[in-house]
Every structure is written in C-alpha cells, then in structure tokens.
Amino acid sequence: MVRRIEQQQQKAVNWMIPGNESVLEVTIGYEQVAVDLTANLAKNEPDPYAKSVLDFALLEDFDHLYRYANLLDLTQKKSAGEITGKYTEIMPGRPTSLEHRHPFDDVRKHYDDKKAHPLTKLHAMAITAAEQQTMNFYMNAGNRAEDELGRGLYLEIAQIEEQHVTHYESLLDPNCSWFKMLLLHEYTECYLYYSMMEHEEDSKVKKIWEEHLDQEIEHLKIACDLMKKHEKRDPERLLPATMPDKLVIFESNVDYVRDVMARQTDLNAVETEFVPSAKMPKHGRYQDYQTAVNAHGVPSSDVIRGRIQERGEDYRQELAGPHPVEKFRARNGQAKAA
C-alpha cells in the first residue's frame, strides 16, 4: 500500500516537468539539480569523510552539465544558460573521460549507524535517491537522441551515474535491519518534503509538497509501528526529536563549487580514498580500465571538440570570472577537448 502511494507521488512530481522541453533540456535541469543539491548537502555535512564523498562527485556532475550544455548548443542551437539562469555556472569540472573507474574504486566506507549524525544519514539517502532517479532517466531517455554523438554522450554519462549510485549508496550502514532502513527512508522523505514546503514560492506547487508531507508522516508512523511489532524497539530513540535546522535549499552555490574545484579537480579514487593524480598507482586497475573504456574515443570529449570546430570555442556560462583552474581556462585548444 505504501509503495502504491510512493508511485503516485513520483508521478505527480515527474509530471510537473513541462512537455514542451526536449529530453536534452530536461537533462540540463537534472544536472543543475545534481550540482546544487550536492553542494547544499556538502556545505551542511558534519562528517568529514561523507563531505569528501559529496565534494568528489559534485565536480563530476558539474562536468556533466558542461558536456550536455555543449551538446544542446551544438545540436539544437539553444543556450543551457536560459534554463539554469544565473544560479549555476557551466564550465569544465573533473573531465568525464577521467571518471571511468574500475568498480572496486567506487565503493566508499560506510558510516556507523550507531554513531553517525542524523544529517549524515539523511544526506546519504537523499543523494542516493537523486542519483538513482538520474541514472534511470538516462537509461530510459538516453536512446532518444537521433545522432551518434548524443547517444554516445548519454551512454557514457549514464554509466557514470551508476558509479555515483554505488559511490553514495555504499555510505549506508549495511548492519541496519530492514525495519531500521525503512524508518530512515520514511524520515528522509519527510525531511525532503518539509524542506521543499518551507522554501516553495509557488502556492500551487506548495500544496503538492504539503500533501506529500502529510502522506509521508503517515508512512513514518507505519514504519514505527512495524519496528515496534517485529523488532520490539522504540523508534523514538532512533530518530531526532525535531526536524533538523539545516534544511535542503535550492540556491546558487557558485562560490562553493569554485572553491571545491580549485582544490579537488585533480583528485581521483583508489579504493575508498581520494588521492591526487600524482599519487595514483602508476600501473594499476584505473589505468587498465581507462585504456579499455577510452580506447576508441570518448563522447564527452568529442562533444567539446565538435563545438570548438564549429564555433571556435566551447560553450560556457562563467558567472564569477575565469575558471578557477588555470589549465581549464583556454576555450579553443586541445586541453578543452580533454
């Protein structure tokens, strides 16, 4: 019964996306959400390791936005900046071509459910759900592109989204019981809908968040009852007494993203840790995987190369000045095709 209501909620939210947007225009929205949601969670994340996990993937989703924006300009002659507004910059992040990692290097250390801050649990569940939705969208809509360049880019980035789902979901403590996980899932939904309701300016949309919050409060009550019945545990001892003060807010994060980019663009992953490229194993599975996956070219690089060939430079929206990483400032050279 709860699953049926969750499906109705998902359709209600998904059907708010206007039908006159192309798949690629909707994609720009997805990636803008990924950037600004991840940045917001990272800014409020109390656990240093969980924050590093958010920051790491933030730069990758930021680069995805840049690649799709160039594809939109190249194939539909439309500006992604008209969709993102003056909230989110569009320029290179960690190059997508460098994001192809061996599966063993996308698993993270999980938090300890008995010690972790409630926000850490909420953030991990929220971002996992967001990346899962994005992965599913690309899996179902990515083959709608009519040209090989677009189909290739969706294929490439859809694979990275699977890596991100693994990256984030592995933060969750596997020692939690199914009933504890259900409790946390329902509490996360209450937290997200409450956040949306508190900051929604459109009165009609706000009513949707209010209705869904009412439903999730009931679902949370059901989860509590199930835990009491089957585990003989008091759910009130496992949840905060009040909703966290730090809610999810969709706002501009230009300065935060630039700061992370200046310090962490060069990082990559070795098992559960993030290390600079200079400290990556010289002859390891990352290099082997890169050689195999990128052997015949990389769509994310081809898109930028195609835009440069047609217009003389890549498409960007730099709202706060030149790129914070010097090697990415040139807009018409080989570095841009990377």
Image (cartoon, grey):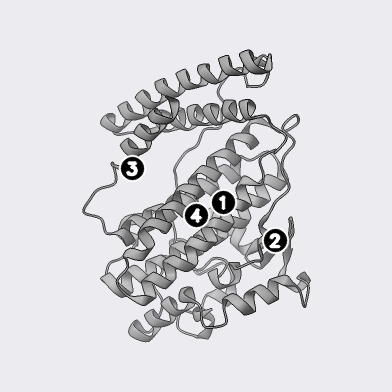
Closest to the observer, 241 or 108:
108
Q: Position of residue 77 (x, y in %)?
A: 26, 71
Dot 4 and dot 1 residues touching (CB under 8 Å): no
Q: Amino acid at mark 2?
A: Asp
- Label 2, on which residue? 105
Q: Describe the element under mark 2 as helix, strand or loop.
A: helix
Whichever of labels 4 and 1 marks the residue nearer the N terminus, that label is 1
Q: CA distance from mark 2 to mark 3?
A: 32 Å
Q: Amino acid at mark 4?
A: Val
Q: Describe the element under mark 4 as helix, strand or loop.
A: helix
Q: Amino acid at mark 3?
A: Asn
With respect to residue 229, does 170 lie above or below? Answer: below
Whichever of labels 1 and 2 marks the residue nearer the N terminus, that label is 2
Q: Quick one: label 4, few (<14), some, or many (20+) residues within 10 Å? A: some
Q: Is residue 87 visible?
A: no
Dot label at residue 14: 3
